[in-house]
Image (tube, coloured by chain):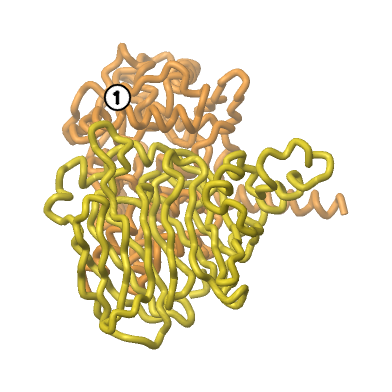
Chain colours: A yellow, B orange
Amino acid sequence: MDILTMKPRRQFLLTGMLGAMGHGPLHAAEDRTGGDPLGSPQWPSLRAQYLTDAPMRFTDAIAVYTPAFADDAMNVPLQIDARALSATGGGVRRMRVLVDRNPIREVLSFEPLRALPMLSLRIRLEQASPVRALVQTADGQWHVGGVWAQAAGGGCTVPGASRADGSWKSTLNQVQARFFPNPVVGSRRLRVRVMHPMDTGLVASIPAFYIEQLELADTSGQAWWRLALHEPVSENPLLTFELPPEGPRAFRLQGRDNNGNRIDAEVRA
Amino acid sequence: MKATAWMLLAALAATAQAQTAAPPAPRADVRTLDYGLQPRRIADGTWVIEGAVDDFSRANGCNIINTAFIATGEGVVVINTGPSRLYGEQQRRAIARVTAEPVRQVLNLDLHPDYFFGNQAWSDTPTQALAGTIAGMQAEGAAYEDNLYRLCGDWMRGTQATPAREPLQPHTLRLGRHVLELRRLQGHTGDDLVLIDTHTGVLFAGGLVFAERVPTTPHADPAAWLASLGTLEEWQAQGQFKTVVPSHGPVHDGTRGMAQTRDWLQWLTGLMRDSAEQGVDLSELMRMPIPARFAHWAAQPAEFNRSLAQWYPRYEQQALDRR
């Protein structure tokens, strides 16, 4: 299967079109997007909040995939692939996922550590928006990639299925995990599901309730990846990681939600 | 150069005609909100009003459905009422241009919005559907409205979801020379009404058969759907009908649409089963190249992506459960 090597065409198109408009000398004075190739006026404030004065550049080297149109705004598939930066600036240190036009803009922060800099998950979208991956390499440089995601919207402000029917109580923080050999060349894929309502706090009378931290460690206590999650991650998160093909077969997944409930599960190949 | 382009266009047009033998899509006029509905006679007393073979869009007025009517000699039976109040009104006028017979009843073949949103224009006429269909229309009508107003804009002006009022049991309806077999199948939705006119040999297949268009699946059960296609193929082999009027796609003779719909459902469910077992993510599956035999169908890849979003998470969960 060769789908993972396909380049995101929409991203190039948008980058090309809007980049040309944004950088043209005639429009330079009017550019309120901070040179954002996605043409988003939210970008300057995102940059100030998350990157402050750190060096950054826009790049097509980070593949960000969303569907052309997301019919289910509560479960928008998102895949981020920064493997093209593996040999840049000492390799990927962390990636941060932001959605410009969500009421809560930060989706997650991922430290790949010994995993590949690639991640798949589902997110909530409140409306059509740029979805961005801010990737920092070990030399401190930030690389920013992204794509416009079109969506019917409303994903952040309606209760999820397990909240609506109350079933979340019987499954809270249960973990399922399975390894898959080689869907991506040179990777051992780990898919993890943690049962959690991931309430955004934006539905009346339902306070924010979400998983804050997850970490995969081997039996010697060595961490393989670390993840900080935020409210826009979809209910019952299904997270897909890429580990090197060779390595331990037994791990432990630990974490907690914002109410202090613990997540602790054995993960075995 | 110019001549070559013209020849190519002509050749393409000829090919398209030979393949579908269908008239051109209706010309919707966005400025006047005129759907340009043109009834086309396909059998004795039987007309279809063909929609665009496409996905919903403002350009086509969101008119992507084939509606139909049968002038039986003892009144007209209308099948499906289109995506909006405006459609229902224009459909009513289009029927009156063709026949002076009064309309005696309106049938909605399933619960999807373009099957019944024109019911508003038929408030003085019995509107009928299977009981489960009516329950679904009542439960989901408001959400359909939101979605269609968003997709179709002004075409939806003044439209309010108006579910069928009379529950219908499967039965045989004899009117004039026409013998209408109303039967209940399922799979595209929980309650799929099909109508066979044994006088003309026409099957009104509703959403169970798609032709040259990707099937829609928001309420579908693929196993039940495949079983219903088997039933339809049996009826066709017995000679109960020869012409198929699908709700989406060209009117055609024989098993073409049934075979296409079966092929798609089998391919899609097989793809999801195998992909989930290999650990493929939904995002990756949506970028899969679609086999050539499906790639030219209308509403591709939008409907493929919708079906994956609706169905694939179940397969992913099963793959985790199987560990």
| Residue B190 image offset from top left, x and y in percent | 23, 43
Residue B196, compared with residue B288, is above or below; it is above
The residue at 41%/51% (across/down) is A76
Q: How many marks?
A: 1
| Residue B127 image offset from top left, x and y in percent | 28, 22
Residue A28, compared with residue A244, is above or below; it is above
User: Can residue A210 be seen at all in this image of the molecule?
Assistant: yes
Disc 1 marks which amino acid?
Gly
Callout 1: SS: loop
Farthest top residue in view: B124
Position of B214 compared to B142: left or right? right
Farthest left residue in view: A170
Farthest bottom residue in view: A246
State the residue in front, B161 or A74. A74
State the residue in front, A173 or B228. A173
The residue at 49%/37% (across/down) is B56
Number of residues whose C-alpha sits closer than 10 Å to that of mark 1, classed few (under 14), some (14–19) or many (20 or more): few
Position of B16 compared to B184: left or right? right
The picture quadrant where one finds residue B77 is top left
Badge 1: chain ID: B
Name the residue carrying label 1. B176
User: Can residue B235 be seen at all in this image of the molecule?
Assistant: no
| Residue B54 image offset from top left, x and y in percent | 52, 42
| Residue B151 image offset from top left, x and y in percent | 49, 33
The residue at 62%/50% (across/down) is B16
Residue B292, compared with residue B132, is above or below; it is below
State the residue in front, B136 or A219. A219
The residue at 42%/63% (across/down) is A120
Task: Classify the position of the C terminus of chain A by image quarter.
Answer: bottom left
State the residue in front, A154 or B235. A154
